[in-house]
Amino acid sequence: MTDERRAPEQSTPLVLLAEDDRLFRSSLSEMLRKHGFAVESVDDGQKALERIRRGGIDLALLDVVMPKLSGVEVCRMAKSIAGADFLPVVLLTARNDVESRVEGLRIGADDYLGKPCDERELVARVQNMLKIKHAHDDMQRTKHRLEKLAIEDELTGVYNYRYLQERLGEEFKRAQRYRYPLACAMIDIDHFKLFNDQFGHDTGDTVLREVAQRIRASVRDVDVVARYGGEEFLLVLPNTHFAGALNVADRVWRAVGGKPVTVPERRHHVTVSVGVALYPSRDITSKDQLLKSADEALYSAKGDGRDRICVFQQQGYIYRPDISTPSQKPAPTGS
């Protein structure tokens, strides 16, 4: 279903009315509008289905017998389109026998309304269905929020440590099984403690968020960006060999240090140190060893002066670029 959904604060419910009888369609539309509902009306089942596909409908009121597609057919397809969303469907029919009602309910209709309609019954059934929909939508929003909290770092918006450990384990097993290369990059914001000490934790939080955003913009969709802890981030780079990992590390390093981070009334020069580890490697046979190697490479980069990249492979640090730009600074400064 394409997304023409309205913002939660827009409170007028939108009812789609599909009825091929022009006079009856006009009468029902008038009843619904009189009670505060927005109404879009169509005269056949195909048009109803096309409108449902565009999204943004709160309830569908479908005549059972219509040209092109019946209300029952539209209901069946609409329910599959909606997916996890809940679209209440009320069928309109002049047939009030039990078999007709049971058929509609079996394929997913939420309620039935006999023709001709009593206005009070029509409004009561529509309102009841909308209450159920609103409760369902609230539950889905809460579920989505909790799912995000379970895997996302609240401050930076990247993945959290818990999700990182799970995903890294999966990627390492995949790399072992299919003999794919796997790279891991640990990133540390240089002299981060001084941002908090000199300018306050609000500034530190702004720096963390901006660095996270720049890191995320520097990698592929399949790569994993996670907050490892404090001012450290970790990249998991599936199916990435030495040259590719080095390119990613270089892009991240330049993205962070290439321009100042702006906090109200100040511009801060921020740099990062990056440690990269690779699998397969003679010294790495588990995800924990991959993390340890990336951490050791990061430690070497910081010990070598910070604001640089170091790659660990086969018991040696094989890449320390000669950094000339952006300029190194021993501590954050404001301007």
Image (cartoon, rainbow, N blue to C red):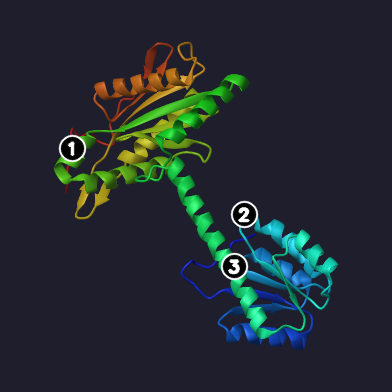
Gap between marks 1 and 3 measured at Cα: 49 Å
Count how many numbered circles sit on residues in the image: 3
| Three-letter code, disc 2 | Ala
Residue 304 seen in the current view: no
Which three-letter amino acid code belongs to the residue tagged 3?
Answer: Gly
Q: Which residue is mark 3?
A: 56
Local secondary structure at mark 3: loop
Instruction: Place residue 57 in its image quadrant.
Output: bottom right
Residue at horizontal 46%, vertical 51%?
Answer: 145
Left or right: where does residue 316 sit relative to residue 327?
A: right
Q: Quadrant of the N terminus?
A: bottom right
Mark 3 → mark 2, Cα distance in angstroms: 14 Å
Mark whose residue sits in front, 1 or 3: 3
Question: What's the residue at 50%, 73% (across, down)?
Answer: 11
**Dot 1, crowdedness within 10 Å: few (<14), some or many (≥20)?**
some
Question: Pointer 3: residues within 10 angstroms few (<14), some, or many (20+)?
Answer: many
Q: Nearer the viewer, residue 57 or 3?
A: 57
**C-alpha distance separating marks 2 and 1:** 47 Å
Mark 1, secondary structure of its residue: helix
* Discs 1, 3 touching: Cβ within 8 Å: no
Residue topped by disc 1: 194
Q: Is residue 94 visible?
A: yes
Q: Please provide percent x and percent y for residue 166.
A: 49, 31
Front-lying residue, 121 or 240: 121
Which of discs 2 and 1 lies nearer the camera? The answer is 2
For this rendering, which residue is in front, 107 or 162?
Answer: 107
Residue that carries the numbered disc 2 in the rendered image: 84
Of mark 3 and mark 2, the one earlier in the sequence is 3
Q: Which type of secondary structure does the marked residue at label 2 adopt?
A: loop
